[in-house]
Image: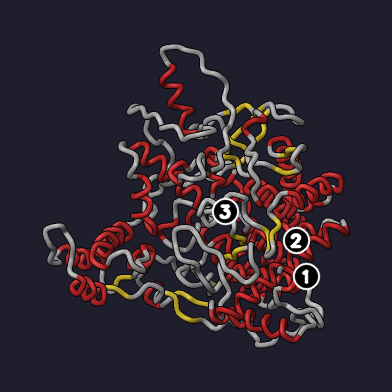
Amino acid sequence: MAFFQPHFPPIPFSPLTLFHLFLIMPLLRPATATLPEVFSPRLVDRGPVVPVTNLVKFLERLQVVALNSFGKLDFDLKYYVDLSLKFDLDSTETAFDALERSSNGSVSVENLKTFITDYFDSAGTDLVYSEPVDFVPQPIGFLPKVENSEVRAWALDIHNFWKNLSRRVSDDLIHRPETHTLLPLPEPVVVPGSRFREVYYWDSYWIIRGLLASKMYDTAKGIVINLISMIDEFGHVLNGARSYYTNRSQPPLLSSMVYDIYLRTGDLEFVRNALPALIKEHKFWNSGFHSITVRNAPGGNGNHSLSRYYAMWNEPRPESSLLDEKLASKFVNNYEKQHLYREIASAAESGWDFSSRWMRDSTDLSTLATTSILPVDLNVFILKMELDISNLARAVGDYCTAKHFFEASLVRKKTINSIFWNSEKGQWLDYWLDNGLYKGTHTWDARNQNQNVYASNFIPLWIESFYSDSRQMKKVLKSLRNSGLLCNAGIATSMINSGEQWDFPNGWAPIQHMIVEGLARSGLKEARALAEDIAARWLQTNYVAYKHTGYMHEKYDVQKCGDFGGGGEYVPQTGFGWSNGVVLAFLEEFGWPKDQNIDCHLTS
C-alpha cells in the first residue's frame, strides 16, 4: 500500500472547525488508513459542465438495458455509445420505449437483439476504409539505419499497418451527423485500433511520428487539420472525436505535431494556418479552472502560474457510465458523487487513466484527486507548446508573437524548477494543492511534493530547456538509473502495483519515447548509451510479442520481454497506433545492426 500525504497547516478550533475539516479532508492521504470524507449539504460542485447530446443520453439508457439482458461477459459499454442510428432519434426512442419488459424492467435477449439490428448500424461503421494518398509499400529512404533484414521486414509490416488503420467518415455521417456520436472530421484519420474506433488527441502525436518515418507527410498533416477543426468548433482539442468527449481534452501535444511536420516538410503555409489554433489552445490550458497560482516557492519571487487537469464534467463518463456509477455507489450524497465523477473525467483528460498517481490511496480508485494535483508532465507540455509557438511564429516572420511566447517559456521553465524540482531526489515531483476544489492562490510547501516515483517525474528530459542543462542532467540521469523504473523490457510507469493500467508493471510507448529522445539529444555520452539500451529493450519486447501474437499492443509488461500489459477497466487492445509510431521512431533514430539478433537475449 502506498500513500502520499500533502502537508496542511494546523486548523485552530473555532465554530468553523467542522467546515474547515470538510475543505481539507477529501485531500488527505493518511499514513495507515483512508479517512472518510466529510460532507456539507451547503456545498455543491460548482465547476463547469459541458452537456452531452440527447443521442448520447439515449444510448446510455440502451447501455443499461443491454447489460441487464446480455450479461457482463464480454460486455463493452463503449460499444453502445458508438452505435449510429438508422432512423431519427425520436422514432428510435419511441420504439425502444415500446419494447416488452419484464417486471424488473429487462428486455428479452431476442427482442433486444432484433431492436438493435433494426434500428442501429454497428459501432465503427461510421468510419470507412480510406487508402492513404501518400502510402507506398517501400518508401524511398525508409529507415536507412536498419541493416538487419529481419528487423526491416518487421518495420515494413508496421508501415503497412497505416493502411489498416486509415479511415474516413462515412457519407451517412456527413449527411446525418445528428444520428452519430462520431464527429464529422474533414480529413482522413488514423485510428489507434481495436475498441478505439476514433481519433484520440495525444495518441495522434506518436502516430504522426511514425507517419513521418514512413514519409506519409500528407496523412500527418490531415491529422493536424482534424484536430484544429476541433479547436475551431469547441475551443480545445477533444479527448477523442466523439460527441461524448466534448467535456475534456488530453495532454496538449498539437504544437509538437505541427513543429515536427514543419521540420520534415518546411511547409510554411501549413504553419501559418495552424498558429491561430495553437495560440487558442494555449489560452485554454492557461485560463479558467485549468489555471492555478502558487506563491512563495523557492528560487522564485511572487506568484507562479501553472496548469492542472480539470474536466468540464461531473457525471459518469458515457463510455464507462456503469463502471463510474458502481465506483461512486459507496457515496450517499450527490455532491460526493459529482466530485468523484469530475475526478474520474479529469484523470481521463490526463491520458493516465487510471494511476495511483492521481489517488490518495493507491488501493482505492474512489480516492481519485486529479484536480488537486499540479502535474509535472502537463506543465512541461505547455512549456514545449510555448517554445513551439515561438519557433513557428519566427519561421513565418511573426516576431512579436515569437518574442511573447519565448518570454513565457522562460518564466514557465523557472516555475517548473521552482515548484516541481527536488534536488535531493534528482527528479521533478507532482505537487499537491492544499485545496483543489477552489481557485485562488496556494502557498508552496515542500511537503506537498509527491515523493513516489513515477515515469512522469522524468518527462522534463524530453525538451531542450532541461536536457541541455548538463549539470542538472547528470543528477537526473543518476536518479533515473536508481529509480527502479528501468526494467528488463523498458521503463515502468510507476513502482506501485495498484492493478490500474498506468502503474507497475506496465510500460507505455509514449513514456519510453519522451524519456529516450531526451536522453539521446542531451549530448551526454552516458545518456545516449542509456537511451540506446532502453530503446533496444523496448524494440525487442514489441518484436517478440508481435511474433508470438501477430499483433502490436497498446502497452507491455516491462518485467519480461515479449509480454503485453494488462490491468485497468478494459481488456488489452491491439493495433496499435502509438506503439507502431514509437517503434518506427526508434528504428529511425537508432537503427538496428545487421548482425544483432532482435530476440530477448539482452533482457533475459
Residue 525 in picture, x, y percent from top left: 88, 59
Q: Residues within 10 Å of mark 3 (few under 14, many from 20)?
A: many
Frontmost of labels 3 and 1 is 3
Q: Nearer the viewer, residue 378 or 331?
A: 331
- For the residues labelled 2 and 3, the Cα–Cα distance comes to 22 Å
Residue 521 in picture, x, y percent from top left: 81, 59
Type of amino acid at the residue the image marks with label 1: Glu
Residue 40, placed above or below residue 401: above
Residue 224, placed above or below residue 214: above
Q: Is residue 378 left or right of residue 390?
A: left
Q: Which residue is mark 2?
A: 517
Q: Which residue is mark 1?
A: 589
Quarter of the figure with residue 48? top left
Does label 2 or label 3 sit earlier along the sequence? 3
In this figure, what is the number of numbered marks?
3
Residue at (64% x, 72% y) in the render = 542
Q: Is residue 347 left or right of residue 538?
A: left
> Marks 2 and 1: in contact by CB < 8 Å?
yes
- For the residues labelled 3 and 1, the Cα–Cα distance comes to 27 Å
**Mark 3 element type:** loop
Q: Which mark is residue 417?
A: none
Is residue 56 in view? yes
Type of amino acid at the residue the image marks with label 2: Glu
> Marks 1 and 3: in contact by CB < 8 Å?
no
Q: Which residue is mark 3?
A: 503
Q: Nearer the viewer, residue 563 or 552?
A: 563
Residue 499, placed above or below residue 125: above
Residue at (73% x, 70% y) in the render = 586
Residue 342, placed above or below residue 257: above
Frontmost of labels 2 and 3 is 3
**Mark 1 element type:** helix
